[in-house]
Image: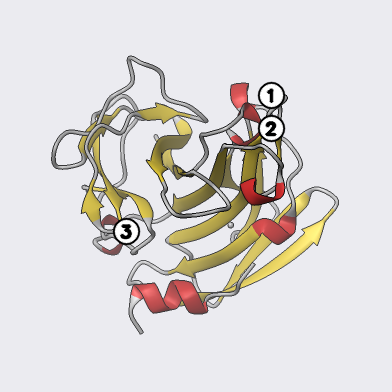
Amino acid sequence: MNLDSALKLAIAGLCALGAGGAHAHTVWLERTGQASGEFRMQFGGHGGKLEHFEAERLQSVAAFDSQGGTLQVARVVDADGVLLRIDGGTPALIAAHYDNGIHTRTPQGPSVLQPMNEVPGATRASHAVKYHKTILGWSAFTARALGQPFEVVPLESSAPRASQPFRVKVLLDGRPVPGVRLGHGEEGGKSAPMTDEQGIATFTPVPGLNKLWAGKRLAVEGEPRYTELSYEYVLGFYAD
């Protein structure tokens, strides 16, 4: 089974910019501390603030060992959101896809969570889609692209070190994307590193959990529901 098939067959169950700040959020995973294969999905907005999210918008989750073998993923929805339990081996990489819906700018100004063709007078709408990858064990496999539509791929197979340059490549449908800024957390500022013509940029990790952010907006024509596809990505990893 190839990686793309594994992602599609994994237990269904997880990039934002656009019409309003309500959907400028990211998703990522954190260890719970309760079990080695247990992770909590987090959803946050500006300033690192955690927020509640709709579990049914989690489209897919896939877990792999260091050789690229697929692992079992169980998803538990509770009062705190979504808990993931990985079984069948030690997870080296967990990938996720989350759809945050279509946000339409109304003629009055505020955005609503509805397709543009259902909002009278609306002319702008953004479909906010988020992809995520958590790397827990570094190997040649974790430095390969999974085939996510929008993806951040490490160029090194060894674990990043805090304060040491770390190169990544940003891909859109498998092709390098120039001009994409990277950031720590939910957003990248004007001074953040930007991908070059080969889609490559250098990121400087900090100690502990890193959430490398990347985002891309794409204008869409001929789609009655929205005028923009908004991708947002978080690559999560730990650095010493």
Question: Horizontal placement of 140 versus 237: left or right?
Answer: left
Dot 3, how many residues are within 10 Å of its Cα: few (below 14), some (14-19), or many (20+)? Answer: many
- Amino acid type at mark 3: Thr
Residue 213 lies in quadrant: top left
Residue 109, which numbered label?
1
Q: Do the residues labelled 1 and 2 touch (CB within 8 Å)?
A: yes
Q: Mark 2 points at which residue?
A: 106
CA distance separating discs 2 and 3: 42 Å
Dot 1, how many residues are within 10 Å of its Cα: few (below 14), some (14-19), or many (20+)? Answer: few
For the question of whether residue 16 can be seen, the reply is yes
Residue farthest toward the left in the current orientation of the protein = 197
Colour treatment of the image? secondary structure
CA distance separating discs 3 and 1: 43 Å
Expressed as whole percent of the image width and height from the top left, the position of residue 164 reads: 26, 28
- Amino acid type at mark 1: Gly
> Which secondary structure lies at badge 3?
helix
Camera-side mark, 2 or 3: 2
> Of label 2 and label 3, which has the lower sequence position?
2
Q: Residue at position x 54%, y 47% from top?
A: 226
For the question of whether residue 35 can be seen, the reply is no
CA distance separating discs 1 and 2: 5 Å
